[in-house]
Amino acid sequence: MKNGTAISIPQLIDKTIENYGKILQSIENEGFSFLVYGIPPASRDENMYHYPFYADKEMRVFISRKFNEKLKEFCVKKKYPYLEIQNRFEDESGLISKAFSADTIHLNEKAGKIIAEEIWIEVGSSNFHK
């Protein structure tokens, strides 16, 4: 909205993934091990900070799902380990599940423990980037 819709949301997502890729490539070049995990599901927040442009729930769900889809595709292509969290912590509407929500935006400790366990599993597997 800020750019007058001159750049579409899918284009903005692609550009963001491209920027992530540059950072991940530099981390790989330095020889560090890493794992990428997606963004959490869309928040339940109704613009509590009063941003001038704030998408409705349906659009936020679309954006978070599309972003994670593109990030996963990128990681698979580059053979970077990727941990899917979107579908594990969303409710039937695609928003952050109340069971895993610390507030309307952030994942809670229960979700954090699940993510930590998944990371440990990934670290022990041959899929972890070395």
Image (cartoon, grey):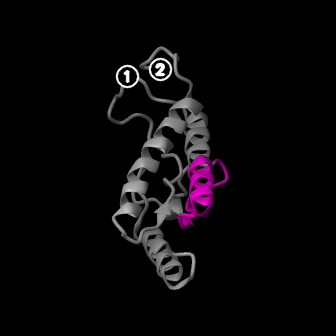
Q: Amino acid at mark 2?
A: Met
For the C terminus, the quadrant is bottom left
Q: Residue 83, relative to residue 117: is it above or below? A: above
Q: Residue 129, relative to residue 59: is it above or below? A: below
Residue 33 x, y percent position in the rendering: 41, 72
Q: Mark on residue 1? A: 2
**Residues marked 1 and 2 touching at CB (< 8 Å):** yes
Q: Any magenta on residue 76?
A: yes
Q: Is residue 90 visible?
A: no
Q: Horizontal placement of 28 versus 75: left or right? A: left
| Residue to which mark 1 is pinned | 52
Q: Any magenta on residue 12?
A: no
User: In the image, which is nearer the foreground, mark 1 or mark 2?
Assistant: 2
Q: Residue 21, relative to residue 100: is it above or below? A: above
Q: Nearer the viewer, residue 110 or 63?
A: 63
Q: Horizontal placement of 78 versus 123: left or right? A: right
User: Which residue does the image show at 48% across and 42% down from the upper left?
Assistant: 18
Label 1 and label 2: CA atoms lie apart by 9 Å
